[in-house]
Image (cartoon, helix red, strand yellow):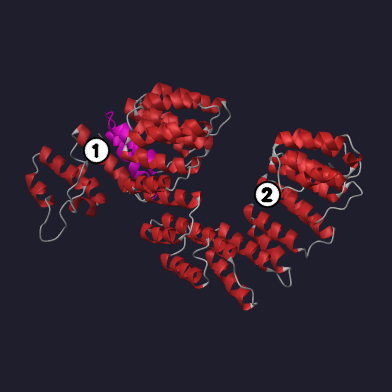
């Protein structure tokens, strides 16, 4: 019987009923006070998220070794119960048991996950005082945690004190520079690492590529990609996945597809990244096509992938895929996920079924800022200002802090409802109460709100007061107000700011031409017509109807 119990305890995990049965048997024997068995039972409870039972096992074990301490601290840290984890760590320091490198690594990660920089520095001090300042596990975790907290200088301080850093430490430091976007430092460290005879692995490249995603030139990205191929990492699923993300982010979808096709078995992250990349590049039909290919592989999507597909469906205003995904989400319980529900709200609204989106919102068991922004924007798009304001009040009552997207939705509601004074209040509230700077989207809404309600001069004054280069969208909004109010005097000024976007046969050019025609300026209309010998003609568009 004992041999059977030991066999069960040696497994990596157990179900909660099996764990309770094992615990019940051990509790009746002399094994109950053995820290080895207690540690195994505690870990099984932690895996099954039963922290209360895990803590009871810990409290009833008279002799606690470091493995038992580490297990209970890790259990609370993984459950994001950082306060209890720190309290247990303090109790450990006051006990006769000496913490080891895994203890400090676990507590340091809890500090960074809990955004507690002060505690992280205190843990670093304890690492030094316990003589572990040269330990690879402690140092790699400190470098990782400092970088996650945005403390690159501290991470570099830990790294440069190591005389002969191993591959784990090099990877941690390169990932640190990657996470803060300093790809040049990352490349320098890879060169230095190779100069010391240490060969990079897949984790090295993932850390570096993460730093290339946002700001690096395309030639640098392709150079690093070529280095991955040279080292044989392109077929590595982790490296391939981050390469797909890198190319998708800069809308190089042909290269993203090439990397994706080279993967032996793409994971959910790779599929989601590719679908999101096509959607963000404006090729929403291709995004849906990739999703169909994914389904043909017989795999089930996760909430992240569903959100990407819903975004493509919303932009195309095709309800069919949205309905299918909603049904699938309900079957799998994903409809309760905030990200999926928020995407469903947006999809239903853009497909002309606002009430369905509102029902999704009403049924959400929990809501965050993203879900409130989705319903506020949707209501605003349909001119239901009163309902949008009510949702905003609910957001504030729940203690959430509005962001730029929140106010964009509110201003949209004011614009569609003609509520000039209320719009002004929200526009001022952004800066004065929440310290948010208005962006192009907010100025577009304000210009339309003022210009479409007989206050074109005020709208123009608002645009002229901007201290940064005015986006074409803002000038375009002002131009549409001139069209609405039949005010032709301002058109010439706006036309100069739109410059080449008028002459090349764009939508702005058509609008200016129509305005000139409205006031009888036919010579100007003729001048704006497409010059067959120079400018390109306006590209012929297509339309589609989903039946």
Q: Is residue 483 above or below residue 382?
A: below
Q: Is residue 426 left or right of residue 148?
A: left
Q: Position of residue 65 (x, y in %)?
A: 87, 49
Q: Position of residue 348 (x, y in %)?
A: 37, 31
Q: Is residue 195 magenta?
A: no
User: Looking at this view, is 57 or 496 the one in front?
Assistant: 57
Residue 206 bears which disc, if any?
A: none
Residue 205 seen from this side: yes
At 24% from the left and 46% from the top, the residue drawn is: 494
Q: Position of residue 480 (x, y in %)?
A: 24, 38
Magenta span: helix, strand or loop, mainly?
helix
At 23% from the left and 52% from the top, the residue drawn is: 501
Q: Which is nearer the N-term, disc 2 or disc 1?
A: 2
Which quarter shows the C terminus?
top left
Residue farthest toward the front in the current orientation of the protein: 1
Q: Is residue 137 left or right of residue 239?
A: right
Residue 112 bears which disc, if any?
A: 2
Residue 480 bears which disc, if any?
A: 1
Dot 1 falls on a residue whose secondary structure is helix
At 43% from the left and 67% from the top, the residue drawn is: 222
User: Looking at this view, is 242 or 178 the one in front?
Assistant: 242
- Quick one: label 2, few (<14), some, or many (20+) residues within 10 Å? many
User: Looking at this view, is 421 or 307 the one in front?
Assistant: 307
Q: Position of residue 445 (x, y in %)?
A: 35, 36
Per the model, the C-alpha gap separating discs 2 and 1 is 50 Å
User: Looking at this view, is 472 or 189 the one in front?
Assistant: 189
What segment carries the magenta color?
A: 440-468
Dot 2 falls on a residue whose secondary structure is helix
């Amino acid at each position: 019987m004992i041999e059977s119990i030991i066999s069960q305890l040696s497994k990596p995990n157990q179900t909660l009923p099996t764990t309770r049965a094992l615990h019940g048997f051990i509790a009746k024997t002399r094994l109950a006070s053995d820290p080895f068995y207690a540690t195994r039972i505690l870990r099984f409870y932690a895996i099954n998220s039963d922290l209360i039972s895990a803590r009871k096992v810990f409290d009833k074990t008279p002799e606690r070794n470091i493995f038992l301490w580490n297990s209970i601290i890790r259990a609370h840290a993984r459950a994001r119960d950082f306060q209890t984890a720190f309290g247990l760590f303090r109790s450990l320091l006051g006990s006769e048991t000496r913490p080891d490198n895994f203890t400090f690594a676990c507590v340091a990660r809890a500090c960074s996950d809990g955004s507690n920089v002060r505690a992280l520095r205190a843990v670093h001090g304890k690492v030094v005082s316990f003589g572990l300042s040269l330990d690879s596990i402690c140092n790699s975790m400190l470098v990782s945690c400092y970088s996650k907290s945005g403390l690159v200088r501290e991470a570099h301080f830990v790294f440069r004190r190591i005389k002969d850093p191993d591959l784990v430490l090099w990877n941690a430091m390169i990932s640190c520079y990657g996470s803060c976007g300093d790809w040049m430092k990352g490349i320098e460290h890879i060169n230095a690492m190779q100069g010391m005879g240490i060969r990079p692995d897949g984790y090295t490249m993932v850390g570096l590529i993460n730093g290339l995603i946002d700001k690096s030139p395309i030639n640098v990205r392709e150079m690093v990609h070529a280095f991955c191929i040279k080292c044989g990492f392109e077929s590595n699923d982790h490296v391939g996945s981050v390469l797909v993300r890198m190319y998708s982010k800069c809308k190089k979808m042909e290269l993203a597809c090439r990397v994706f096709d080279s993967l032996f078995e793409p994971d959910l992250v790779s599929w989601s990244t590719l679908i999101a990349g096509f959607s963000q590049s404006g090729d929403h039909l291709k995004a849906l096509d990739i999703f169909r290919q994914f389904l043909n592989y017989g795999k089930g999507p996760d909430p992240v992938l569903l959100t990407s597909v819903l975004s493509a469906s919303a932009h195309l205003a095709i309800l069919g895929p949205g309905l299918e995904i909603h049904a699938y989400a309900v079957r799998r319980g994903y409809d309760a996920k905030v990200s999926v529900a928020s995407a469903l709200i947006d999809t239903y609204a853009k497909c002309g079924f606002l009430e369905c989106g509102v029902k999704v919102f009403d049924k959400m068991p929990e809501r965050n800022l993203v879900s409130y922004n989705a319903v506020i924007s949707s209501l605003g798009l349909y001119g239901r200002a009163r309902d949008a304001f009510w949702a905003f009040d609910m957001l504030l009552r729940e203690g959430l802090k509005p962001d730029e997207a929140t106010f964009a939705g509110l201003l949209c509601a004011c614009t569609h409802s003609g509520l000039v004074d209320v719009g002004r209040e929200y526009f001022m509230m952004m800066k004065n109460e929440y310290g948010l700077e208005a962006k192009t989207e907010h100025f577009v809404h304000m210009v339309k709100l003022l210009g479409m309600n007989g206050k074109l001069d005020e709208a123009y004054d608002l645009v002229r007061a901007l201290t940064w280069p005015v986006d074409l969208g803002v000038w375009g909004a002002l131009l549409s107000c001139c069209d609405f109010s039949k005010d032709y005097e301002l058109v010439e000024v706006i036309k100069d700011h739109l410059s080449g976007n008028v002459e090349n046969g764009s939508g702005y050019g058509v609008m200016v031409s129509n305005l000139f025609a409205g006031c009888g300026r036919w010579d100007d209309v003729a001048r704006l017509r497409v010059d067959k010998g120079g400018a390109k003609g306006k590209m012929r568009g297509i339309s589609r109807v989903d039946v």
